[in-house]
Amino acid sequence: MTELPLETEDGSFAGSAVAALAPLLDLADVRSALHDARSAVDEAFGDPALRRSGGQVAVEMSLRSAVASAALEGHRHEVDEVRAGTVTDPVVQGALRVAREAEGMASLWPKVPRQVLARVHVLAGRDVVADDTLGRPVNPEVVPRLSGVLSLVAGMSTVPTLLLASIVHGELLALRPFAGPSGVVARAAARLTLIAGGLDPRGLLAPEIGHLAREPEYLGAANAFATGTRDGVRAWIKHCATAVELAAAATRSAG
C-alpha cells in the first residue's frame, strides 16, 4: 500500500484530500504529466464534430471502456463481437453493466462512495461470484483502508481530478476489497472519479483503452504503486496520465 501523507497506522487516511494528496504534485514530472493529459482532453472535447455527436460517442466509448476493462481482467473479446451481442462472458457482461450505469452512479459517487462502490461490485460480479458476496468486502481487515480511500472521494473538488482518480484506482487495485473481477471495480471507480470530478463530465473518455494499449506498463506501474515508494507512486500517476491522453485521442477519432 502507498505511504501517502497523513496515513495512519491502520492504513487509513487522516485529514482532507488536499492535505493527503497535494504533496504528490511535487513528485518529479507529475504536474507536467497531469497538465499534458488535461490539455489532450480539452483539445479533444473542443472538436466541433464531437460537440455534435457527443451522445453517440459516449455510447461507443462506454462500450470500449467495458471491453478493455474486461480484457485487462483476462477476458479478451473483439469490440465488434461484443457490440453484436454474441459475447456471453460474465466478466464482459458485468463490465458492460457497470459502464451503462456509470453516468447515474457518478452523480452519487462523491456523496455516498461506499454505496456506489458496492453497487459497482454487484453489477460487475453478478454471475461471477456468489450472490452473498456481492457488494461486501472480502474480509473486515480491508474495511479501514477502504474507508480511508473512499474518504478522499468526498474531497474531490479540492485536488486535481486525474490525481485523485489515479490514487483511487491504484489503491483499489492493491487492496482488492471485493471478490471476483476486482480490477473492473477499480477501473470503474477511477472512471467515475473522472466523470464526477468534471474532467470528463459527459463520459466521453475510456481510460481503459489507454491502460490496455500499454498493458505491460499498466501492470508494472500498478505493482510499483503497491510498494508505496515515491518512485512507484510517481510511475503510476504518470502512467494514468498517459492512459488518459490515449483515451482522449480515441475519443477524438470516434467523433
Image (cartoon, helix red, strand yellow):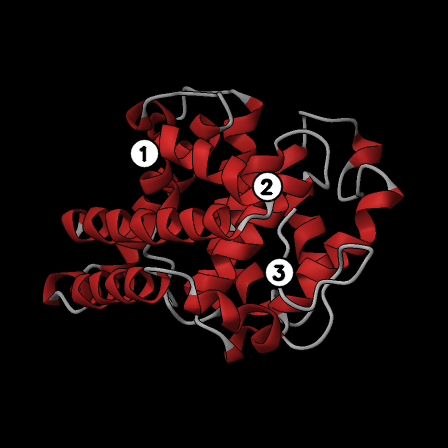
In the rendered image, residue 199, in percent from the top left (x then y), is placed at: 37, 68
Q: Residues within 10 Å of mark 3 (few under 14, many from 20)?
A: many
Q: Which residue is mark 2?
A: 227
Residue drawn 53% across and 35% down?
A: 223
Q: Nearer the viewer, mark 3 or mark 1?
A: 3
Which residue extends farthest bottom? 158
The amino acid sitting under disc 2 is: Thr
In-front residue for pair 170/127: 170
In the rendered image, residue 216, in percent from the top left (x then y), is placed at: 38, 28
Residue drawn 54% across and 41% down?
A: 97
Residue drawn 33% across and 47% down?
A: 243
The amino acid sitting under disc 3 is: Leu
Q: Residues within 10 Å of mark 2 (few under 14, many from 20)?
A: some
Q: Which residue is mark 3?
A: 4
Q: Which residue is mark 1?
A: 214
Residue 101's label in the rendered image is: none
